[in-house]
Amino acid sequence: MALSELTTLDMVSLVESGYIELRFVTTVFRDSEEIARTYDRRIIIPGQDISGEDPRVQAIAEATWTPSLIETAQAINAPKTFSCRA
């Protein structure tokens, strides 16, 4: 009884804001028969390093991420600091 696992990029979606949503499917096999399947999601923000991503994801980012879009996304996602006055 041999168990094996395979994770693949299952879906790539481009959201209007420029974010790229990735869905991965992990399939578990017992003796070549599928016994389980799970899904994981991840979001890539415009301007984020994509050098290690799937070539299809890189192509989408390069075709859609304009300098203006990257600047807006980075401003929205910049760390926020808050101060409280006593």
Image: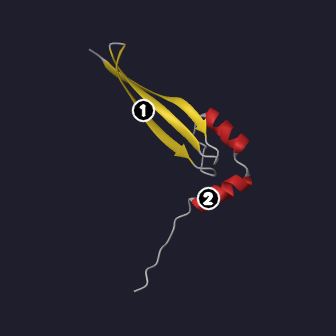
Q: Residue at x 53, y 44 (%)?
A: 43
Quarter of the view holding residue 70:
bottom right
> In the drawing, does residue 25 fall left or right of residue 66?
left
Q: Amino acid at mark 2?
A: Gln
Across and down, in percent, residue 60 comes to: 67, 38
Relative depth, front residue between 34 and 18: 18
User: What is the CA distance from the residue labelled 1 to the residue labelled 2?
Assistant: 27 Å
Q: How many labels sit on residues?
A: 2
- Which secondary structure, mark 1? strand
Q: Residue at x 47, y 39 (%)?
A: 41
Q: Earlier in the sequence, mark 1 or mark 2?
A: 1
Quarter of the view holding residue 86:
bottom left
Q: Residues within 10 Å of mark 1 (few under 14, many from 20)?
A: few
Quarter of the image with the N terminus in it: top left
Quarter of the view holding residue 73:
bottom right
Task: Provide the residue designation for mark 1.
Answer: 39
Residue at far left of view: 1
> In the drawing, does residue 4 fall left or right of residue 60?
left
Q: Which mark is residue 31?
A: none
> In the drawing, does residue 31 fall left or right of residue 65?
left
Position of 79 relative to 3 (above/below): below
Task: Provide the residue designation for mark 2.
Answer: 74
